[in-house]
Image (tube, rainbow, N blue to C red):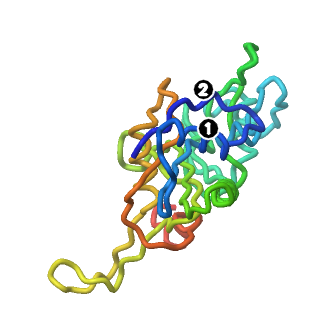
Amino acid sequence: MTALPNIPLVQRGDDLAAIILRGARDAQIELQDGDVLVLAQKIVSKAEGRAVRLRDVSPSPRAIELAREAQKDARFCQVVLWDTREILRVRPGLIVVETVHGWVCANAGIDRSNVAPHSGDDEEWVLRLPADADASAHNLRERLRAATSREIGIIVNDTHGRAWRNGAVGVAIGVAGLPAVEDLRGQPDLFGDELQVTTVGLADQIASAASLLQGQADEGRPIIHARGVPMMRRDGSAREIVRAKAMDLFR
């Protein structure tokens, strides 16, 4: 894995494909079939105009009620509600929801860190997840295929907490050009016995590994190039990762 250098601060409307190609050239990387590029969700959301200025948000009665429960800004809670399918848990300082995308996460993935546009204003901004990160990944893959004639995998990753385990990790929220989940059932194990239940969260593994290089603070390394990932060749979608509610024993 290699962090692409010289990535600028991304703003609304920026061409991520062009930024990737410049970064690859600066890193002296020629893209090859089977390579995977992992992009931090923030730069995808910023390029797609998903930043929200809280001054422009009018909280609904439900947002005001939620703000009292969670002890948060009612305007922030309104943005959370925009991207929420179901509220699962609320306590002071935390709102856990199922998002419209199907993710179970804190605050619908709405983020305040490293968000404000770079225009010199001191307004408070928050950033929503991409409206459809699979589509974002697919469109970017098509742009890179047209520019390089290479079959590249794309992952959009975000940092999520985990039930029952401390510490946030990188997870895939958008996937194109590779399986999100690999089904190994039917393959032999080391002793020739057939695997019965083994499925592997391939996209999440790659997303988490890339997060080690991306960092979580002021590193400025939002695009990671991966080569040599052992994987089956097929197109995939982050929707594969979402466990069906009927199979969820804890809700």
Amino acid on which disc 2 is placed: Asn
Q: Are marks 2 and 1 in contact (CB under 8 Å)?
A: yes
In the rendered image, the vertical position of residue 123 relative to residue 142, given as above or below: above
Q: Which residue is tagged 1?
A: 42
- Residue name at image x 29 percent, y 81 percent: 195
Secondary structure of residue under mark 1: helix
In the image, taking residue 45 as reference, residue 165 lies left or right, namely left
Residue 198 image offset from top left, x and y in percent? 34, 74
Amino acid under disc 1: Lys
**Where 86 falls versus 49 (above or below)?**
below
Farthest residue, direction left: 191
Q: Residue at x 43, y 72 (%)?
A: 232
Quarter occupied by residue 167: top left
Helix, strand or loop status at disc 2: loop
Residue 176 image position (x, y, % from top left): 59, 62
Task: State the residue at coordinates (46%, 36%).
Answer: 214
Residue of label 2: 114
The reply to whether residue 100 is in sight is no
Residue at x 45% of width, y 67% of height = 249
Relative height, residue 110 to residue 132 (above, below): above
For label 1, count other residues whose C-alpha is less than 10 Å away and answer few (under 14), some (14-19) or many (20+).
Answer: many
